[in-house]
């Protein structure tokens, strides 16, 4: 896909703040032990042949830069094209539904004007799905659309997801919050590059708006069409959705769908030894990462890299992130333990399935 470039926006805040996003943006949240959320947006683009990708950074960008680096792990460390780290406006936006902030796009106009591409793929990092964007682009060209948005029929109510009003496959309205059965936006779309540049002139005075908010009165002259995606999708906007999206992957059918052999999800590589299951350990229906050492009992849990579960410790229905140690006799249940924590011997971290406990990242 040589005539298409990509752009991933990371400069927005979660509506519901939590200890997980106090020191990192949503894009760099760990996922399934070894990935970050941004890996899916990046992999969707590079798997279809896009070799020029920009990333609009939030003010707390350190963890994203630490993860993506020069883009080597996604084959984006190259002379022509490659990964472009782009500045976002100070503190981005926490406005409901604003994830393609016009101000961030206009400030980075040079990224688009210096390209000779025909179109631009946009994405955020808070939707987990693995799509063949070549099929989306083919449908975009065949339909003659100005913009093609990737959508899916909502299976439940989600107040954080943007929804479209659609007639005969064409968008005629947009609103924030998707109800069951409505057409929810997966925050990924392709737009003709010259039209995008024209929009910078049209909507320049309202650069505090999201791109689709600005387009609301122009769906009559701008042909915005939908592409229905039928695979697994997890929108992640709060701790409940984040926990559930991780736990979904303990179902091998979902894991096989999200990680097909022909569309691998790329991530930062680490030189870490395999996990070791010590004599007397017990592991059931869990995802274990490299560098882990397990002496105790683990069930229905996702472990990040270099986690130690000592003898006599029990971890159940939880997420334990990189570098944590669960000491002997400790019990962790219905919890998210952020990275580098030590759970002292004999202590208990227990939430409920409806209200998961979060142990914030260690400050040491």
Image: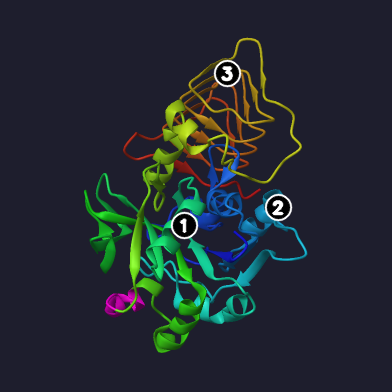
Nearest to the eye among marks 2 and 1: give it. Answer: 1
Q: How many marks?
A: 3
Q: Is residue 9 above or below residue 254?
A: below
Circle 3: element type: loop
Q: Position of residue 106 (x, y in %)?
A: 52, 81
Q: Are marks 1 and 3 in contact (CB under 8 Å)?
A: no
Callout 1: SS: helix
Residue at 51%, 53% in the rendered image: 134
Task: Residue 155: give its label.
Answer: none
**Which residue of the protein is positioned furthest toward the front in this rendering?**
142
Residue 287 picture location, percent across and down: 54, 28
Assign a secondary structure to mark 2: loop
Q: Is residue 52 above or below residue 268?
A: below
Q: Nearer the viewer, mark 2 or mark 3?
A: 2
Identify the residue position indicated by label 2 in the image: 75
Q: Which residue is mark 1?
A: 138
Q: CA distance from mark 2 to mark 3?
A: 39 Å
- Label 2 packing within 10 angstroms: few (<14), some (14-19), many (20+): few
Q: Which residues are magenta?
A: 213-220
Task: Name the image quarter holding residue 70.
Answer: bottom right
Residue drawn at x 39%, y 85% as measured from the top left: 206
Q: Does residue 346 belong to the magenta stretch? A: no
Separation (CA) of disc 1 from disc 3: 51 Å
Q: Which mark is residue 296?
A: 3
| Pointer 1 or 3: first along the chain | 1
Q: Mark 3, residues whose alpha carbon is within 10 Å: few (<14), some, or many (≥20)?
A: many
Q: Is residue 316 above or below residue 125?
A: above
Q: Earlier in the sequence, mark 2 or mark 1?
A: 2
**Disc 2 from disc 1: Cα separation:** 23 Å
Tell me the mark number nearer the camera, choosing from 1 and 3. 1
Name the chief secondary structure element in magenta: helix
């Amino acid at each position: 896909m040589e005539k298409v470039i990509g752009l991933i926006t990371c400069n927005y805040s979660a509506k519901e703040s939590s200890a997980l996003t106090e020191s990192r943006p949503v894009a760099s949240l760990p996922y399934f032990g070894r990935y970050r959320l941004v890996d899916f947006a990046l992999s969707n683009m590079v798997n279809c042949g896009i070799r020029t990708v920009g990333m609009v950074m939030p003010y707390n960008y350190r963890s994203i830069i630490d993860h993506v680096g020069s883009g080597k792990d996604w084959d984006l460390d190259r002379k022509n094209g490659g990964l472009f780290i782009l500045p976002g406006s100070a503190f981005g936006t926490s406005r409901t539904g604003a994830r393609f902030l016009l101000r961030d796009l206009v400030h980075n106009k040079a990224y688009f004007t210096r390209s000779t591409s025909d179109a631009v793929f946009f994405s955020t990092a808070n939707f987990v799905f693995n799509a063949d964007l070549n099929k989306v682009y083919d449908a975009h060209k065949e339909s003659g659309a100005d913009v093609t948005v990737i959508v899916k029929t909502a299976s439940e109510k989600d107040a954080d997801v943007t929804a479209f009003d659609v007639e005969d496959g064409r968008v005629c309205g947009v609103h924030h919050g998707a109800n069951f059965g409505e057409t929810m936006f997966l925050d990924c779309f392709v737009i003709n590059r010259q039209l995008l540049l024209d929009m910078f002139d049209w909507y320049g005075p309202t650069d505090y708006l999201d791109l689709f908010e600005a387009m609301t009165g122009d769906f009559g002259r701008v042909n915005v069409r939908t592409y229905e995606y039928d695979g697994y999708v997890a929108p992640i906007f709060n701790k409940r959705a984040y926990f559930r999206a991780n736990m979904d992957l303990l179902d091998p059918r979902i894991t096989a769908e999200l990680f097909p052999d022909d569309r691998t999800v790329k991530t930062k590589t680490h030189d870490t030894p395999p996990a070791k299951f010590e004599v007397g350990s017990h592991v059931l229906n869990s995802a274990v990462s490299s560098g882990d050492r397990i002496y105790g009992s683990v069930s229905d849990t996702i472990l990040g890299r270099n986690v130690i579960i000592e003898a006599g410790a029990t971890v159940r229905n939880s997420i334990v992130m990189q570098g944590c140690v669960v000491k002997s006799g400790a019990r962790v249940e219905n919890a998210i333990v952020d990275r580098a924590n030590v759970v002292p011997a004999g202590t208990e971290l227990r939430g409920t399935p409806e209200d998961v406990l979060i142990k914030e990242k260690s400050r040491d």
